[in-house]
Amino acid sequence: MGRYIARRLLIAIPTLIVISFVIFAILDLAPGDPTASLPLTVPPDVREQIRVTLGFNDPFLIRWVKWMRQMFVFEPLNVIEQVFNVSIGEGAERTRIISWSSRGPVVDTIIERLPQTLWVLGLAFVFGILIAIPVGVISAYKQYSIFDNVGTFVSMIGYSVPTFFTGLLAIVIFSVWLGWFPSFYDTTHQVTDWPSFVIQVKQIAMPVAVLSLFNAAALSRFTRSSMLDNLSKDYVRTARSKGLVENRVLIIHVLRNSLIPVVTLIALQIPGIFAGAIITEQIFRINGIGHLLISAIQGADVPMVQTLTFIFAVLIVTFNLIADVIYGFLDPRIRYE
Amino acid sequence: MNKQRWLALFAVMAIILAACGSATEDTTTTAASGATTTTAATTDTTAAPESDAGQGGTLTLLQWQAPTALNPYLSGGTKELLASSLIIEPLAEFSPEGELVPALAAEIPTPENGGIPDDLMSVTWTLKSGVLWSDGTPLTAEDVVFTYEYCIEEATGCTQSSLYDGISSVEAVDELTVKINFEAPTPFPYSAFVSYQAPIIQKAQFEGCVGAASQGCTEQNFGPIGTGPYMVTEFRTNDTALYSFNPNYRGASEGKPYFGEIVLKGGGDAEASARSVLVLGEADYGWNLQVDPVVLADMEATGIGALQTSFASNVERIMINQTNPDAGLGDDRSEWNEGTNPHPFLTNSDIVRALSLAINRQELTDIGYGAGGAPTCNVWPAPPAASTNNDECLTQDIDAANALLDSVGAVDSNGDGVREYEGTPLRMLFQTSTNAVRQTVQELLKSYWQAIGVEVELKNVDASVFFGGDPASPDTYQKFYADIQMYTNGSGSVDPQGYMGNWVTSQIAQRENNWGGQNIQRFQSDEYDALQAELAQTADLGRRSELVIQMNDMLVQSGSIIPLIWRGSVSAFANTLTGVGGLNAWDSEYWNIEDWARS
């Protein structure tokens, strides 16, 4: 098992290097210019000088190697220095990845934006799971009942209607017509007491609800079909004939076995919801990393786009590995060699 | 199930959770330390005299395009210039009427008061005495000299360096006197250190940030120390800026500024900003409200806020390619080649005049711009140098346009609905940047021109490519691989000299200069070049206006530019605000924020 994980981690390193190269190449081929957003009154020679200063004109490979060094050596060292409050070598000598639009360190900006994204995504994910599993279990147990039909209907809607539509619908109904929730997300809001907590709940309610519906829809369908598979198995009949109470049969025996594919799905979905956040954050104007990515793409801020997409890639690779490992734990029949 | 397995699984989960937990913890600590990057907060408040300054509570400003940094020399977008204008100040500002008003300078240097010598080779500014930076240290002439040196250092990548063009040296004569020496006689010497584009930064703070080091100076770029009414307390790039009043501000003894805190919020879009100010009353000011005029009028009817408009020199115009953009020419397409590659029909001024006459500018304004636009027939639209010689274009006249085309022999000889001129059908490729309003205008123009037998093919290019200067891309506005193209441009200064200089022969964008010239439509006239040379030597304001009008008329009447709409800025203010005055289009809209108060 340990060897398997070690081997997978080793394979992940060249994979990530290739990914970073591909991202870099795509961004390099894409049209765009960091000085395009400047007013036309800024003359061409000044623009050229700005491009030189930013390193926009450097050869592709040099920029890639520079970025790799900053990303894998300098930034981790900075984080270690900050966390443990020590200084390693010449801290001031280490150049950081600098955003072309703000001229601030990319990593600091991402860290500044992460809490909003994590709050919304994390809550939506937790709520999604909390809703999906009971709904899936009951739907399967009472197959073709009214509950099952309603559950199927709702999850079909949640799954097939995209978040950019449900999101706008929610804004129109709850923000514009009813005026219950703000359509803006205030990043500087601090939760200090009960009223400020209520404000936080209000501003987070709509995006979390929309994303939860989307997450829960797929998961509840999976739970339901997985439960149905297991309910007809022989071991279930055995358990019942032993005289076990129905709850015990359902929760301990059937549910545990049914969760194997569901847990894998959850692990694999985590990077996906970061991607989903790009749309949701744009709609609800949450200043998180999805929003950051979009504005960076529009402003041709290559270092920012590069770093963010690479972080997404790392997330996907990591959670694939986690999913594989969890799978082995849940199902002892699977062996890693 | 094996117990050890479960234990191991829990251990893994626990580690992941712990990692997540500590990650969020780090986040908050780093965010907090990011917030304190602003050294301005260390000000010695006890030094300030007792006053009413900063007792007015919080002012909320909405800038839906949020500032990315607070150093105007590194990011030249209006949004950054505005956000930094609360903190740092120039020597003099422009008023909404376009007149110079002293800010850090004691008075405006003129030939009468001896600030400008007769040879026009220098200008001498005197600073107000006793001005303090927000950290309590005095402002001196050295800071002004440093600002110049910071910006002209090539490796700094200063976006405003063109404002310091033509200067041979800047010297500190004494503590409060700065002398700017020019390379050539300069009749309008008020571009360096004037307006929110060129404020004074503190030498002590930025000394280590000259040249290549400028990129790493995040603390300075996000929190400059200034002499202005406010200092930044927290800055989040592309999101929010928080300010508190500067107790060392020179107006503090008179109770200025009134507001103690300012929240400058970004995000959302123009329509949401307008709603926040005009309908919901959540904010006091909303910037750049390019919103459907009907929607905006509805919102204003709520009665808690009002719109203000002001006009500088921005004109939405159609540039007429004077060279042949035929793709068959290969590398020579849209190349001027010393005038040997003229456009087959657009160099005929009567054809372009007909195109201009066929346009209903009022309709374009009503549909696309509302209060933020006014029809214009001039490249330089701002008084006193605005021409009145081209006003025939203000009324649409299809018949006259048709008659003009007939008179030059551009007739539809083969009956396909499109006229031909010397055998070339009047078909044009019309490009512009991707933007809802521009595409609507494109459609309307296409229908006007259809009515006079001119066919147009429409094309739009993403703004970051169109306005980006990538010499490898065929879609930039500089390369101009189309017959006509539409965008907005204007002068950064009240004085038209620099702007009118865009259309001299040496500025023609071509392969030779990597399409770096500003004469985008490849206009060429020796007479125009001579007028520009004369303008650069003329100090008399009346004569300067005459020259600008003459040059403007040449650009329009030669048929190389069709001006469409004089574009202003539209902002919304809450009715409770007082002291705002007229909206300033020549300088920062916050230029007089120290006078803003709440009734």
Image: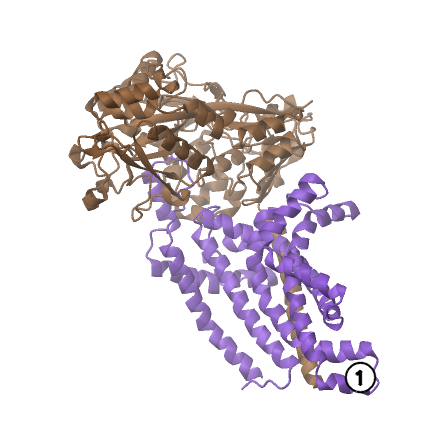
Chain colours: A purple, B brown
In-front residue for pair A159/B192: A159
**Quadrant occupied by the N terminus of chain A:** bottom right
Name above or below for residue B9 compared with residue A293: below
Which residue is pictured at 64% across the width and 47% down the height?
A: A169
Give the tally of numbered discs.
Answer: 1
In-front residue for pair B558/A232: A232
Name above or below for residue A295 compared with residue B323: below
Chain letter for the residue marked with disc 1 in the picture? A
Residue B103's x, y, as percent? 50, 24
Image-quadrant location for residue B363: top left
Which residue is pictured at 80% across the width and 78% down the height?
A: A248
| Direction from residue A128 to residue B434 in the image, left or right | left
| Numbered disc 1: secondary structure | helix
Residue B342's x, y, as percent? 19, 33
Name above or below for residue B267 compared with residue B401: below
Image-quadrant location for residue B247: top right
| Direction from residue A30 to residue A286 in the image, left or right | right
Which residue is pictured at 48% across the width and 53% down the height?
A: A304
- Number of residues whose C-alpha sits closer than 10 Å to that of mark 1, classed few (under 14), some (14–19) or many (20 or more): some
Regarding residue A187, the answer to whether it shows in the image is no
| Direction from residue A46 to residue B203 in the image, left or right | right
Residue B131's x, y, as percent? 54, 27
Say which amino acid is labelled 1.
Answer: Arg
Regarding residue A262, the answer to whether it shows in the image is yes
Name above or below for residue B13 compared with residue B199: below
Image-quadrant location for residue A303: bottom left
Residue A239's x, y, as percent? 78, 85
Residue under pointer 1: A240
Which residue is farthest front? B415
